Image (cartoon, helix red, strand yellow):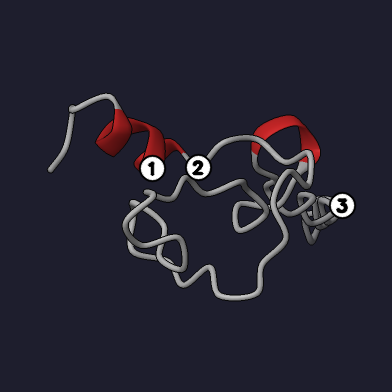
Amino acid sequence: MARPKAPRRPEPAPTRGDRGHRFEECEHLVSDEDPDTALCGVDQTDVPWNQGFPVCQACLAVAQGRMS
């Protein structure tokens, strides 16, 4: 007698970033010397500030001196 197949599990929901935001939705920190480039290296030309997203953890690490 054939063994019945186990029911298929639903695919998991895509992983979301901080508080339901996608990982690329974050506020980057910039320096006064180069306001078009984030401390993590992401281009910030023409990107509005204070969009309400979580702070970029790489930019925060650089700002706190944990990375160079």
What's the residue type where badge 3 is placed?
Pro
Q: Which residue is mark 1?
A: 59
The residue at the point 37 percent across, 49 percent down is 31
Q: What residue did someone put label 2 on? A: 56
From the viewer's side, name the closer residue of 18 and 46.
46
From what the image shows, is residue 57 above or below residue 40? above
Q: CA distance from mark 3 to mark 1?
A: 45 Å
Question: How many numbered marks appear?
Answer: 3
Decide: few, some or many residues near mark 3? Use Cα within 10 Å; few <14, some 14-19, many ≥20.
Answer: few
What's the residue type where badge 1 is placed? Cys
For the residue carrying disc 2, how many other residues have a C-alpha within 10 Å: few (<14), some (14-19), or many (20+)? some
> Does residue 55 appear left or right of residue 52 in this picture?
left
Identify the residue under disc 3. 7
Query: Disc 2 on helix, strand or loop?
Result: loop
Residue 47, placed above or below residue 27: below
Query: Residue 32: image x %, image y %?
Result: 39, 50
